[in-house]
Amino acid sequence: MDKRKRRLPRWAVCLLVLAGLGVAACVWELISSQNPYLLSMKRALKYEVLGLEPISQQARTDGLAEGYTTQHYGDGVAVDGFDGHTDRKSVYEDGTVTRLVNELDGYRLDLPAGTEFDFTLSPLFTRALGEGFDVTISRETATYNGLGDVIGFELSTFLPFLFQNNSVREHVEHYEYRFLLSQEWQANNRVAVEQWSDEGGVDFLSAVLQDPGEAVYDGYLYATVYTGSREYLRILCRYDSGDAALRDQLCRSIDQMQVFDPTGEGVYTAEYELTEPENWTQETAQLFSDISNGDRMRWGVFTQDIYGTGIRETVPELEQALDYTFDVLLSYVPLNTDFPTEFMEENRLSGRLIQLTYQATDNNNEELFARSPLLDMYRGELDEQIRTFARQAADWGHPFLFRLNNEMNSDWTSYGGVVNLGDPQIFISVWQRIYDIFQQEGVDNCIWIFNPNDRSAPPSKWNDSLAYCPGDGYFQMLGVTGYNNGTYYTQWAEQWREFDVIYDEIQEMYLPHFDQYPWIITEFASSSIGGDKAAWIRNMFDHIGDYPNIKIAVWFSYADFDGDTPARPYWLDETEETLEAFRQGLARLQEGQS
């Protein structure tokens, strides 16, 4: 009897070895991967299943002087303990430094003693305000630009000794700082920029606004703290450029910053309350009341030739084809332009309301690396031009809708945040400055519209639309803009979006904050490339009643061009089918409102 042990065939041994290597590779991949989807699963396992703490008690207070004080914040409110709270922050004060431990964004940061914090927009960022400085800290995520980015980044985390990947840094340089890093932009905007990295791998940028005039701050310090994942911490410090000691202190604080895995869910505590100006004319106040409280939807239109043949030929022809008279017309006014008094009066006499869009651009938003008029406004250099415009508006004296610098959370406008030092506070300062000038010049016939785009570019938290809100008392209507851009630009992975998909997202985004305000779709349309435009219009009329805050909707009847090619044909009368779909929709709504 053969008692020798039977051996596995070599092929079976090879399979077992490969299977073992595969299991080991999967385990290592799970441990090492920084893929955003796996990362969220790993954090849930770490915090929710295993019950681990994001930062140890020793690390929270290590280095603080004896006798420090502690204040915890749960969901934006001062609390004694964190039970039941998902948005957790702790502030420690020892007389030398103020330390913030932010569990939601995963960092510990020491700032000068006496620093106070603003957690009202906590899901987006935290603001820190101290003697001579203002800091915004956000945890951002670098997007993937294709399959190559995904594979390259995963290989760099799986086998870091063999593969290097710079896609996160490239994302930061392009999406966050391509304007600041441009010598052309620097020269045109009188901004001096320095760039360096410290030994710990933190990337710094310093920008000084030359000839600052009346600017609130002229010194800007930017830091990017990398986490080893697709996430990074973006820190923007505003300060007086003459205070070199303060800048050095801020640099040291950032260099010593401790980063850990974030946990929890952010909670907004910002409140936006509608305040109607006391100085409005009776006619303006009545119009606003009619818009806010009326059940009738008002419709408007924009055409390219609105100032010329538009109001005399193009719009009347559209109205005849639709058997409808538009209530609102959209028009644009760039810098170095007078208030269009004659145009406003002609439309008033014909019963139309004008949505006047005033944009801080002198090149139609086409040369973004050129001089930024918004920075000139921030310096206080264009006050007289604004005053002249305001006086003309006041002299005309009748109500109009005033949309100032729309779609500011974008990288396609001269006054966009990323174009202007990456600082939404500049936009807010300019808005408030213009508003105050209008009040000083007696403009009592103007209804102000705050109008971001529905999608931010870059898609960073610091660039969210709420970061640009000018505050209570500085606007009376919320502008909501969401286009179905179509699918022409395949390199941007554009997708066909139905009306209800766009505005369901808009309502979810804005209703918790701006439910008191009447909303206006300041401009919208559907492209015809990538789907059935007439069906899109029918869907729009089927669903527009789902959003009761929307009181006015304005169709942008023109196009976006790629050279001479209409890349996004938005014309309302593009075909007989699109025109008929709109006519039938208006008729249905009028029957329902009668």
Image: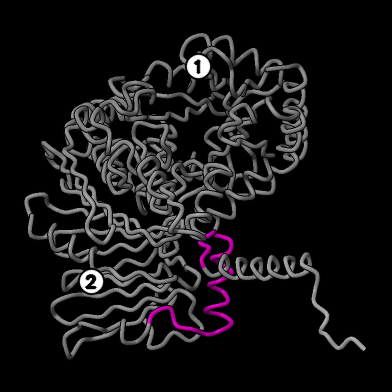
Q: Amino acid at mark 2?
A: Asp
Residue 345 figure quarter = top left
Up/down of 507 relative to 520, above or below: below
Q: Farthest residue in the right direction? A: 1
Is the C-beta separation of discs 2 and 1 under 8 Å?
no
* Numbered label attached to residue 306: 1
Q: Which residues are magenta?
A: 32-55
Sequence-wise, the earlier of marks 2 and 1 is 2
Image coords of residue 166 (percent x, y): 41, 48
Total marks in image: 2
Question: What percent of the width, then of the height, locates residue 568?
Answer: 60, 24
Residue at coordinates 38% horizontally, 80% vertically from top-left? 55
Position of the N terminus by quadrant = bottom right
Does residue 335 sit above or below 75 in this rendering? above
Question: What colouring style does the render use?
Answer: one colour
Query: Magenta span: helix, strand or loop, mainly?
Result: helix
Residue 89 lies left or right of residue 439; in this view the side is: right
Query: In the depicted view, which residue is nearer to us: 421 or 394?
Result: 421
